[in-house]
Each structure stands twice: as C-alpha cells, then as structure tokens.
Image (spheres, helix red, strand yellow):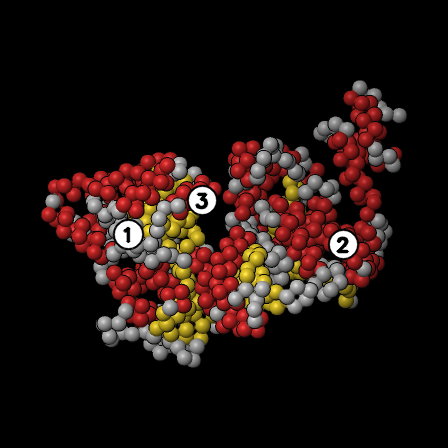
Amino acid sequence: MTATGAAPGKVILFGEHAVVHGQPAIACTLSDRGVASTCTADPDGPRLDMPEWGQSVRPATTDRAVEAVPRAFALALAFVGLPAEARLRVTVEGNLPPSVGMGSSAAFSVALLRGLAAFAQRPLTEADLLEGGTQLEGVFHGDPSGLDHTTVALGGCVYFRRAGSDQDKVVRRIALPAPVHLAMGVTARAGNTRQLVARLKTRAADAPRAFAPVFDAIGALAGEGERALEAGDWARLGVLFDVNHGLVNALGVSTLACELMVDRARAAGALGAKLTGAGGGGAVIAVCEDATHARAVAAALDGLPEVRAFATTLQA
Amino acid sequence: MSERDARLPGFYKLEPDARRSLLQTRFGLTDEDLAVLNDGGALTTARADKMVENCVGVFGLPIGLGLNFRINGVDRVVPMVVEEPSVVAAVSNMARVVREGGGFTGDADPPLMIGQVQVLDVPDVDAAVRALESARDRIIARANAVHPNMAARGAGAQDVEVRRIDTPWPMLVVHLIVDCADAMGANAINAMAEGIAPLVEALSGGRVRLRILSNLADRRRARSRCAVPHTALAGAGWAGAEVARGIEEAWQFADACPYRAATHNKGVMNGIDAVAIATGNDWRAIEAGAHAYAARNGRYGSLTRWWNSGDTLHGEIELPMAVGTVGGSTNVHPTLRVLRKLLGVESAAELGVVIAAVGLAQNMAALRALATEGIQRGHMTLHARSVALAAGAEGSVVDEIAAELVRRGEVKLGVAEQLLAASRSGERAS
C-alpha cells in the first residue's frame, strides 16, 4: 500500500527574534511550497530516502553523534506506534530552500508524521501532531520557540506567543479573507539560526534598556498586523512590514543582501517588504497587489546577485 | 430530510415571487438569499471584472428548479440554469414518475483526476519507463510538495502511471493520479504536473512539453439508476408497457448509431449542464469528459442504457463527473451560495450523483416524448411562451397569447405581436 503525507512551508510575517524573547509573532503557511512524504511497504525497510538531498538513512536512536534525520525518523516511527523494524520505505521530497526561515525542518517533521500515521492507519489529532512536531523539531533545533511547527501543523495564518515564566502560551488562527500574494527572495548563503539567536541574546542581555523597547515595538506590530490581515487591508499590511523590517534591522540581524532585496522590492512597487526568518544569510518577503504583481516584483529581485526569487501565496 | 420534500405541487402555477416565498419557508432561505435570486442575481460588473478579461457587463440566464427528485432516499430540489424551454419541466415530470419506483439511486467513484506530462525525445524508452516507474514514490511526493495542503488533508497525488505512445509520434506520457477531495481540482493538478516536470525530465532523459490535466476523468465517474413500473408510464392514450418498449427501442437506436447518439447525449447534457452551471462547475469540462467517454470503445455511443425486465423499465447512466463543491467560481458568484443551500449537497461525490440523476431523467423524458406522442407538441407550448415573451407580453398575458398561438398552429413573432396589440387595445383577436 501507499500512504502519503505533506506539510506546507511557512514564512514569519511579524515578530522573528522577538518571539524568542516572549513577544507575540504571526506566521502563515504557503499554498504552493512544502514537503511531502510517500510511504510504501518494502521488505528492506525501514528506510528514509531523500533523493533531492542525496540522503538515504535508517532510523537511529542510540548514537547521539548521528545526524538529525535518522534520529527524527526513529522518533516519528515510535510516535505513530510503528515498530523500529517496520518494513517500509519513506520517500521525502520538497521545494523549500533549507535554512532560510521557510520552516523546512518543521514541514519535514509534520509531513513525515502524517505519512507514517497514514501508513499505520492511525489518525493523528491536531494535539498529537503538535506534540510529535515538538519532539521532532527538538532534534533539529534544540529549543525551538514552537512557532514553526505549530504554524505548519495547523496550516493557515497563526498568531503565536510562547509560554514564559510570567505568561501563558497563546496560539490562535487568523482568518484571512483572501490569499495574500508575496514576492520572496532568498540568498544563496544560508544563515545559522542558532548562532544568530545566541548572539542576539548576549547583545540584548548586555544592553537591556536599548533592546527591550525594540522587542516591545515588534510585539505591538503583531497585534496591528492581525487586524490588517483580518480586514484584508494589504496596503496597511505592507506599511507594517516596512516598520517591522526597520526594527529587525535595529536588532542587528539584517545583511546587505537583505537590505538590497527590501529596497529593490519597494522600488518595484511592493506594498511593503521585510526580512523574514532569522536573518544572517537572509530571506525577504514583499506583499503585492495580486499574483501578476508578485511575479513582477519577484522578477525585479531575481536580478540581484546570488538571489533566487519567486512569487508565492499565503494560504487563506 | 422530510421537511425538504422535493414535491411542490402547483409550483409551476405560482408567480416567481410566490415561488421564492415558498422556498423561504421550505428550505430556510433568508430575505437576503431571495434578494440574490431576484433580477439577475447579485453578480456585479465589478466582481465580474475580476473573473474575465475585457469585461463589459453580466449576462443573465433563467434559474429553474427541477422538482420531485428523490436520490438515494433523499429529496432534492435541483437548481438548473438553462435558456432552453422544456428542460426543467421534463426532468421534473420524469423525477415524479421515477419516485413511484422509489426514486433514483446512484454512486460516485473516489475523486481521482489525471494530470498528464508529455515527454518527447526520450533516448531509451525502456530505460525511461523503468526509471519513472521505480521513482513512483518520489514523483508522488514531489507533486504533493507543490500543493501541500491537499495532501495534508489526506487527498493529493496518489499514483503514477507511464503510458507509451508509439504511433504516429513516439512519446511517453506520465499520468499523475490525484485525489481532489471535494474540489474539481484543475488548478491543483496543473500545478502538480508543472511541479513534477523537471523530475520527469531528469528521470527519463527526455524533454517535457505539455503539463496539464485530462478532462477524460474516467477514474471519477458518477452513476445513477432507476427502475420504473410500467404502470407509472401510462398516459395520453398509451399503455405503460408500450411506452417502456418505445423508450428501449429509442435507446437501441442511439446505442447503434452515432448520428442518433450525438443528439441523444445532447439531451442528457441539457440536464447535466444546467445543474453544473447552477453549482458553479465547469460544464465544458463535463461535456468534454462525457463525449470522450461515450466514444471509449472506438465508436461513439449512448451515455445511458434502457431495458425492460418483466413489467419494469430500467435505466442507468454512467459518465465522468469532474465537479467540485469548493473552489473555482463558487466563492466569487453570490448566486451560487444560495443555490447550493437550496440543493443541500455536502460533497462533490453527492453532487455528482445528483447531476447524473438529472441527466438520466432528462434522457428518459426525451425518449418518452420521441417514442410516443412526438416531442413537437409539448415543445410547441413552451416555444410559444418564448415567442409571446419576445413579442413583449408580460404577466398572465404571456400564457394567454401562447395558448392562442398553439391553437392557431402559428407560433410566429408577427402573430404574437398582433395578438398582443389587440389585447392591449382591449379588443379580442378575431
């Protein structure tokens, strides 16, 4: 038998980095980009093939030195109640550039869980999927905020605030009245999220009075952004993107490539543009009037050195 | 579902306003819903301008209700958008007759559609077929990654098949089999076919040209059946058994002769297209699929089958049914929302069965009319109404003038105009 699973990629609309520091953030899944798994019975299994990345692995649980994918595979098998020696082969494909903040590891985790659950004929509830996603994301990211896999597992637009010593976790869906058309540019050089987050933590701890107002201002944008998204006010969304980008720049995580992309997108008539994800290498999203406009803005970004650009759509 | 009783006796005698009020009490339509149905619906030019290019306005068509339908034990009032007189009356009459045998039954296949990728200049066809077939799981995953939300909900790409075409031009065609759930699926399938194209090229060593869905949706067929006691077919001086035999013989003609089959199937599509339009579905796609399917055995034939056993007439229809209840124009056109509420189907499969039943009812009506009294007279009355309307008649005068036209055997615009002028000046036409 063949079972399939998939999960969409995501972009952060508001609140990257600030979310780690307890501020609310908004992320949304994409309609046309993600990761998918196909599971088939195979006497030589269990095996996980990722032909695009040249990987073919068996699950591994004990050796802590092995790479993340075999450990995530073992965890996923156990999570859906399949034996560690299950005779199956999982093939994974995707169209998310890795390490640019599009949630590729979260989408991998959720797509793997969904495919294996379908194979095991064990339906996963939303709560199961969030728990499984947390376990698998832990393998890839150590201590993730949870924003990525929460958004990817729920699908659509999500308002998120992590739990802290003085606050409860908040997760709620934002209903978009229509799909939002984006142009997106990613640089060839990937950022290292872990390093960027750690460096910002040190800097913020050294100068709390300088950074706290910036984090607060970013947090306030999530509330403003939620209203603009619900109202379908894309012009206002664009203005808020611009403000968020300025604040992220103040945190010191932007790069020349990101600044060039933001500038080029605005010059091409985008309603607003901002860095998305951790920064470092960098990815930029620009909100556009419609699909045709998004393709035109993407074409403008594509002219920049070492940039790959495309039009995409936020899932309504 | 008893409160949704699809029998509305005397409905045809009411004024449109009174018909709408009845819908309000029977089907829970709101004042707002009724306003949408009135006067050409609520599709504004501003919205229409977002649907097509160079838009200059909105075109109106009548919405009629197919009554009396009972399908798989559920009563249905079926909205039909059609400009041709007698279609709505014909299906309603046949649905009333079929009710006497328990109504229509039907079922639909899983919503599997086919996306096609054309591969040319393949250097080693055998090797390419092997490579594509052994990468089946990978191709499926690649397709689902392009449209992740479909697969996340348990639908999406399910299988891959490779077809070899040797003559007259050698090529490979990769079929991607996609479960479209409750969507028609055209956009998703096209995106998936485009998404797998680079992988198909890499695996086959060939060059991809077209990447697009097939409208011959023969994995996604809908079927409907009915069994009518001969006694229910009697009337107008004809014995029921005679009518039943006439229908079977008329069907044999269509089954044997493509010239007749084309007209026979056109009648079937009178009913099917009207419901497809009323539910926001792509009726050109359904037409294309139906006619291609009717020719699947190498000769164009009938989409329906009629036969008699004992004192029962049996009918069945089977055809590809690529329809959806989500996506497409359903979110843009306000009238569709109201008509959907009226019809009350919950899935694409359910809608497909309803549409098939309407096609079967329309076919039965046409065959009965042709095989017995001749279609001309029934058609004439309705045609006369159109002519009276064309002459400018309004309200109850329409029926008066139509009746007079039929009585004179002169259903002509000039005559209707004279009658109308006479009626307006208070004189009686001689």
Secondary structure of the residue carrying tag 1 is loop
Say which amino acid is labelled 1: Gly
Considering every residue shown, the one lying at the far top of the view is B425
Viewer-proximal residue, A259 or B328? A259
Say which amino acid is labelled 2: Ala
Residue at point 22%, 61% (across, down) = A142
> Quadrant location of residue A226?
top left
**For the C terminus of chain B, which image quadrant?**
top right
Q: Of label 3 and label 1, which has the lower sequence position?
A: 1
Residue tagged 1: A281
Residue tagged 2: B262
> Quadrant location of residue A45?
bottom left
Secondary structure of the residue carrying tag 2 is helix
Residue tagged 3: A295
Residue at point 39%, 45% (across, down) = A303
Q: Mark 2 lies on which chain?
A: B
Task: Indicate whether B177 appears above or below B391.
Answer: below
